[in-house]
Structure formats: C-alpha cells, structure tokens
Amino acid sequence: MIEIQNLSKVYRMGEHEVHALRGVTLSIEPGDFVAIMGPSGSGKSTLMQILGLLDTPTSGSYKILGREAAGLDDDELAVLRRETVGFIFQQFHLLARMSAEENVMLPLFYSGRSASEPNRAAHLLDQVGLASRKGHRPNEMSGGQQQRTAIARALVNDPSIVFADEPTGNLDSQSEIEIMAILRDLNERGITVVIVTHEEEIGRQAKRLIRMRDGVIQSDERLESVNGQREIEPDSTIDGGNRGADRVRPGLNESSRASSGTPIWMHFQQGFRTLWANKIRTALSVLGILIGVAAVVAMLALGRGAQAAIESQLSSLGSNLLVLRAGASRMGGVAQEAGSTAKLLPEDADAVLAEIDGVRMVAPSVNGRVQTDFGNKNWNTQVTATTTAFEAMKNSTPIIGRFFTDEENLKRARVAVIGATVVRELFGTANPIGEMIRVNRISFQIIGVLPEKGASGWRDQDDVIIVPLFTGMYRLLGKTYVESIDIEMKPGLDSKPIEASVIELMNLRHNIREEKTDGAFSIRNMADLQAALSQSSRTMSMLLAAIAGISLLVGGIGIMNIMLVSVTERTREIGLRKAVGAQSRDILLQFLTESLVVSAIGGSAGIVIGVSAVLILKSVTGWTMEITASSILMSFSFSATIGLVFGLYPARKASFLNPIVALRHD
Ligand code: ADP
Ligand code: MG
C-alpha cells in the first residue's frame, strides 16, 4: 500500500538547512493501524505530510497504491491526494464561514462528485455522531465536534488511507476517546490509518508503533497483527494494495475523469457561497467598485454635457463670422464706448459688403434692455435691433410666422420677432403671432417666433426680442449709431486679410489719422473664439475624467486593502482547499468568479446609481449632462479590471503555494 525508500527532506531556511528526515524506509500494509511517536521536532509531521501527498520529499522514493509520488507536480499530487487519502490536522482547519455540512462537502466539489451524491456529507456527519450539528459553524462547536467534522471531511471521497497528525492534540480526554473510537472503527471497516501522537496511551491502541528520533526511525513494533485484512480482502475498497493503482475502486477512476473539469457553474456556485459567507467583506468590495463606477459615469456625463453645450452654442454663432466694433476689443465682449471717438454707422455695413471681397453678408446691430408687456403680464428682456441678414447669419428663421423685411426696416415698422422665453412669459401657451405687445410703452406687432436655442451657462439665448435696425435705433433705443457689425465671410477664406481690409476701410471712412488708427476699430474672429472655447471645454472634460479616474483608483485601492486584509484568512483557506484536492486552476477559477461577481454587482449598481445621480442633478440644476454608452462601458470595464487585478493578485500568489505552507500561514 505504501512503500517508501530512503526518504529525506531538507528545509532550507536562508543560509542553513534543516534535515527533517534523514533516509526513512518504511512500508505499510493495507488495513494496518500505525502510530508514529517521537519527541517534538523528530520529523513526524514532515513524514506525515509527505505520506499524505501534501508535500514532496527532497530525495527518495514514495510509492502509494503502486504509483510513484515523489516526482509528481503540484496538480498531479492534488488529484492523487483527493482520490486516495484523507488528512486530519491537529488544528482541524475547518473553514470558519461555512457550516459543518458545507465543510464536509468541500472535497466533493473538487473531485466532481458533489452533484452525484448530495446527501453524502450529511450521511458522514451522521456516522461521526454529528447529525444534529450539520448547520453549525465551527465556532459553534466544541473542539471534539470540530475534529469529528474534519474526520467526516477526510472520509468524504472514500480514501483508502487516512492520515491524522496529532488529531487529539488540541482536545480534552473525553473527545480524545471519541476520536480514537472513530479512527479504530474506520480501521475495522478496512481503511488504513496512520496517526501521529505523543501520548503513549494512544500509541498503544494502534496495531503497529513506530518511534522516530532526529529524522530517522528508531524502532518499529508490531502490537497486533493486521488481522482485519482477511475479513476485508473481498472488499474492493482496499484491494488495490501494492498491485497497482489501476485496480483501485471503480469510483476513483470515475472521479478522476470528473476532476479534469469541474464545471464553471459550480465555481460560480462556490464563489457565490464564499461571497455570501463573507458578507461584510463582499459588501465593502462591491461598495468600492460601485463608488468608482458611479463617479466615472457622472463625471463623464458632466464633462461631455459641458462640451456638447459649448459646442452647440458655438455652432449657432457661425464659424465664418467676424464682429466689427468701434474701439479696442476687450475680453468679455463689451466694446469700449467712452473714450472712443469713432462710431459705426449703418452705412459702414453697406460699405463693407460692397467694397470688400470675400464678404457674403453683414448685419449691423444695437442692443438694449427693454420692458415688455402684454395684457397684465410684463417682462424685462433684451432687444436686438438688426437687419434682415441676421435671419440667415444667426440661424434665426422663425419657427412660426416670419422675419421682418428690408422694407419694414426702412419704414421703421413696429414689428418684432420674439424668443421662446418671451413667448412663455407673456403668452404662456397661447399663439403670439399677430398680437400687439408694448415694448418700453411702444406697441409692436409680433410677426414671428425664433427657434429655440437653449440656455447657455451665462445667458438665456431665447430671452430676446428682434426688431428692425432703424426701428430699434430711432424709435426704441434712441441711438444714432450701431454698436457692432457682424460680417460673414464666404466659406473657406483666410480671415486675416479680410479683417485687415475691413479695418482699413473703416479708418478711411471715418478719417482716422495714421497715428490714431490703432484701437479705433476692432474685430473679433469667431473661429478663434470658438477654438479657444472648445479647447477650454476639452480641458474641463479631461479634468473631470481625471477626477473620475482618481475616484476609481481610490475604489480600487479600497478593494486591494480589503483583499490584503483578508489574505491571511484566505491563504489558509486556499491551503485547506488545496489539501482537500483543489488544483491551482480551481483556486484561480474560484477567485476569478468571485471577483467577477463582485465587479459585476458593483459595476451594475454603480451604473444605476451614477445614471440616477446624473438624472437628478440634471433636473435639479438644469446642467447639460450627457450619458453615453461608451462612458458606461468604459467605467464598467475599467472597474472590472481593477477588481480582477486586485482580487486575483493575492489568489494567484497563494494558488502556487504548497498547501502545507499556505495552511501554516498566519
Ligand atoms: P514533529 O512533527 O516531529 O515535531 P516536524 O516534522 O514538524 O517535527 O519538524 C521536523 C524538523 O523540521 C524540526 O526541526 C522543524 O523545526 C523543522 N521544520 C519543520 N517544518 C519546517 C519548515 N516549514 N521550514 C523549516 N523547518 C521546518
Ligand atoms: Mg508535528
């Protein structure tokens, strides 16, 4: 059953080496009950771990059920381990967050048998006398009960050998008696048992007593013959013996086939179970991702909305537009009035159109604040007096009614085209066309309603009245000059030469002498303004994206913290899972599904919360915010990546640990 030849184990600790086993040769027959005794540090545990396929020897040969185990790699050992041996630890090593039954079922999960034998764990708990404790967690049970649960777990895959390393070392004497009774009972039913103990009394209960000292076997005493063997020989359970692993129980081959692929849904199930068992940790991880994703969704929406708002406003200005004013230009757009001697006249606009090549349309204008009223409603608004070219240049063709004509301008007709806000304030939902309103106590007839342009950050573009230039200048605002002349160039022209000739023409027309020409007239180029504004809006969205990125990163660091904090507990958990037969791949898959579930839940909740935050902000503040599919996708995948990377890193590290090292981690 077990043949070891000249086995040695050397632990390397930095510089020096510890020779824990120095050439042990031993064979164990099927059905035997072997006790190993010896002083502390004599290599008992080391031997047991190698025998139990939890560790590999430095040199020598180890044959179990006819198979050489010394050269096997980690994953091959895991498969052999779960098919042939059960291991009972002094410290029980139950998973704290799982019930007794779930703990017992754990090895079945890795051998692929949990689906086919759903009642097996309950049955085994029954056999060790814990039928009433199935749902209890380890911390709700006594030490003896925990160890009995661990024994049930060791038996769940039908091992032919059970190893127990000081199984009663942490227990009271009553529990010790119970555990020994169970082990003897197992042996009577044909299972080979190897136990380490330092209590003479317990060692004496075995059929064979081996004493060790300083890594070698000192004595080997037969206390009782392996007489159970005859009775159990017909039972195929231990029939394999030294005759070869291919003759082991039929169930084994079946399970080894299943082992090559534990179905993905079972990993999900396992992942969900672990997540559910660690609710607070899970909730914190979810929260980290949630905050990150929500912040990214909201920030991106805000940035994009701002950009879109600025762009739509700019496009309504027109990119071939120059604005000519008297006086030096000033940031903020209001031309200097005081101190500038020159005044622009309506005729200047005609001259620009007639004399300068490349100019397509011109629209002189004056502006002012006016009080309007209709019936018992009144409203203070802005009036723009301009010419008919304004309609085409500023995309202002009325949605209902019409724009005024050149003739009406010349006649100083009292007609007005009004913006949507003015309509709402004065008329509510009624049709304003044809109605007479009073503007600064002068009656005007409404002839058209402007298309809605929306609010920009600093001004409502729909809160405006447009009247003919001469009407506005002479009847309404009492001005004999125009404040600005909008000039639209033919498309595709370079604006600089045109700007220069316009200025030159103005200086000429207004007799500005050479030395004073500087600053008498100025031109603002909308294309430049547009470029500057969209540059700053891009900067702003990048800033917002950076803030969002930082919050994602903070969320990620939060997750990493939680993962690091739990790494101790998880390292032992991983050690235990490997000890009961999990391969590295199983461990990785488990953590992958856990991270995926956390990221998916956190990400979806983050999107829902981010989108609701955007909608609420939008309705409360009236900001333009734009949610795009790409921003949602981006934040989701980013958070998923963070979750995966930070979640997988510790798992990956631990999945390569040898199970004993992982189990000893603290
Ligand atoms: P026992 O179980 O008989 O008390 P062990 O097998 O645990 O003895 O240890 C045998 C020797 O190997 C001891 O000297 C111990 O300090 C050393 N040893 C055990 N495990 C390790 C390890 N992981 N790293 C380094 N030395 C170890
Ligand atoms: Mg020990």
Image (cartoon, helix red, strand yellow):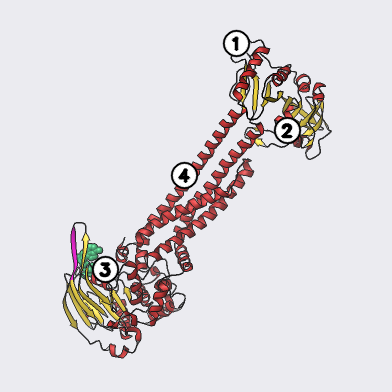
**Residue on which disc 3 sits:** 56
Q: Quadrant of residue 249?
A: bottom left
As for residue 141 lying within the magenta part, the answer is: no
Number of the label disc, if any, that sits on residue 550: 4
Q: CA distance from mark 3 to mark 1?
A: 97 Å
Distance of label 3 from label 2 (alpha carbons) = 85 Å
Magenta stretch, overall SS: strand
What segment is highlighted magenta in the picture?
Answer: 14-22
The tag on residue 516 is 1
Secondary structure at numbered mark 2: loop
The correct choice, above or below, for 336 with respect to 53 in the image is: above
Magenta segment: does it hold 19? yes
Q: Amino acid at mark 2?
A: Ser
- Compared with 336, 71 (above or below) is below
Task: Report x, y in % for residue 509.
Answer: 68, 13
In primary-sequence order, the first of circles 1 and 4 is 1
